[in-house]
Image (cartoon, grey):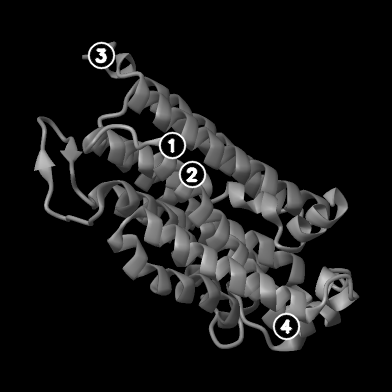
Amino acid sequence: MFVLLKQWAEFVTFQHTVFALPFALASMAVAARDHHGWPGLRVFLLILAAMVCARTCAMAFNRIVDRRFDAANPRTASRHLPAGHISLASALALWVLSAAGLVLASWLINRACFYLSPVALFVVCFYSLTKRFTDFTHVYLGAALALAPIGAWIAVTGGFDFFPQYDGGFSIKHSAVLPVLLAVAVVFWLIGFDIIYALQDYEFDRRAGLHSLAVRWGVKNALRAAFLSHLIMWLVLAGFGLLARFRVAYLVGLVIILACLVIEHWLARKRSLKWINVAFFRLNAVISVVFLVVTVAEVAFPWFRLQLE
C-alpha cells in the first residue's frame, strides 16, 4: 500500500504542493485576523483538502495531455505514464476524482467557493495546454497558483470586498486588497522560477515547437526576466507586509526570502540539471514556508508589532 501511495504521490509530484499551500494558509491567517477570528478545524481541513485536490487535478491533467512530449523528452521519458508504470485510465480516474474532491470541499466550505470551483478547475488545468500556443505559459501557471491565497480568503470571509476599511496608518482591514497583493506576488514568483525550470528543456522545447520565454528570448534574456519577476515579487511582498502592519518577524522573513532569491539565480546561471533542481524546489520551498511562518507569527503574536510602536 505504501509503495502504491508513493507511486501516485510521485506521479503528481505531491511534494510541490508546498509551493502554493503556504500562501493559501497565510491568506487564511490574515483573513481570520481581520474578520471573525481563527477558523475552526473543519474549515482549516477543508481548505487543505481543496488545495490538495486542486493541485492533484492540475498535475494529473498535465501528465495526461503531455504524455507524448514526456515520452519524447529524455529528461521525462521515465515518468509514470510514458514508462507504463501507471495506466492512462488510472490517470484519468485520478483527474476526475480530484476535480470532484475540489468541488465537494468547496461546497462544504461556503456557497461562494462552490460557485467559483468550476472556474478554479478550468484555470488550473488550462495551464497545461498553454505551452502549445504562447510563450507566456509561465504567466498562466502563476495565475493558476495565485488562486490559492484568493480561494483561502473567500473560504474564511465568504466574499471578496475590494472596498477597504482603514484602521489608522496604512493598515487595510476587511479588504480584498491583501489577498490580491499575495496573488500578484505568487504570479511573479512563479514566472521567475518556472522560467528557471524551463531551462532544463530549452533544447527539446525548441525542437518540439513548444513555447516558453526561454525559447523566445534565449537563456540569458530569460534569466534576466526571471530575476526582474522575482524582484517585483519581493517588492509586492514588502508592500503586503506594510499594509498588513507587520513588523519585526516579517522583516526578518523578507531578508531570508531575498537571500534565497539571490542564491536561486546564482545557481540557475550554472545551467546544471542538479543545481536547477536545487534552485527550483528546495529554495522555493524555503521561501514559501518562511513566508507562512513569519505571517502567522505576526498574526498570532501581536507583540512583534508592539515592540516598535
Q: Position of residue 306 (x, y in %)?
A: 25, 14
Q: Is residue 57 visible?
A: yes
Determine contact: label 2, label 1, CB under 8 Å: yes
- Residue at 63 percent across and 72 percent down: it is 95
Could you tell me how far apart the alpha carbons at marks 3 and 2 are, in whole angstroms?
31 Å
Nearer-the-camera pick, 136 or 146:
146
Q: Mark 3: which amino acid?
A: Leu
Which quadrant of the figure contains the C terminus?
top left
Q: Mark 4: which amino acid?
A: Arg
Nearer-N-terminus badge (4/3) = 4
Image mark for residue 306: 3
Determine contact: label 3, label 1, CB under 8 Å: no
Q: Residues within 10 Å of mark 3 (few under 14, many from 20)?
A: few
Q: Mark 2: which amino acid?
A: Leu
Assign a secondary structure to mark 1.
helix
Image mark for residue 41: 1
Q: Is residue 301 above or below residue 81?
A: above
- Residue at 84 percent across and 52 percent down: it is 1
Could you tell me how far apart the alpha carbons at marks 3 and 1 are, in whole angstroms?
29 Å
Assign a secondary structure to mark 4.
helix
Return the residue at label 4. Answer: 206
Q: Mark 1: which amino acid?
A: Leu
Q: Nearer the viewer, mark 3 or mark 2?
A: 2
Image mark for residue 45: 2
